[in-house]
Amino acid sequence: MTSLRPPSEDALADEGMLVVAAALRLALKNRLILRAVAERADFDEGWLFESSGARSPCSSPRRRPRTCGSPE
């Protein structure tokens, strides 16, 4: 019978980051759904980033994804 080696600290940290990322995505999706139902509000990327405390990738002058449209 072969014995399993315990996972490395790096592997554990990577797994933890995956769990955190999934939890954040789920929380943001829930927030969008609740806002849509309670306030009958359409999707608003600006509101989503403001409510999450994150910065929109479109707000960065250095790295503007092609999906952001033309710069203002």
Image: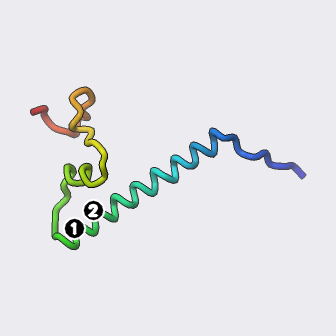
Q: CA distance from mark 2 to mark 1?
A: 6 Å
Residue shown at 31%/45% (left/top)? 54
Give residue 32's mark: 2
- From the viewer's perspective, is 25 left or right of 16? left
- Per the rendering, the mark at residue 58 is none
Mark 1: secondary structure = helix
Relative to 63, does residue 25 appear above or below in the rendering?
below
Residue 46 locus on image (x, y percent)? 19, 49
Q: Disc 2 marks which amino acid? A: Leu
The x, y position of residue 3, in whole percent, is: 85, 49
Check the image and name the residue furthest to the left: 72
Q: Is residue 70 left or right of residue 30?
A: left
Q: Residue at x 27, y 42 (%)?
A: 55
- Callout 1: 10 Å neighbours few (<14), some, many (20+)? few
**What kind of residue is marked 1?**
Ala
Residue 10, position as x, y percentages in the image: 63, 38
- Relative placement, left or right, of 47 versus 30 is left
For residue 36, which numbered disc appears in the image? 1
Q: Quadrant of residue 14?
A: top right
Residue 40 position in % (x across, y down): 16, 70
Identify the residue at horizontal 19%, vertical 39% (top origin): 68
The answer to whether the residues at label 2 and label 1 have Cβ atoms under 8 Å apart is yes
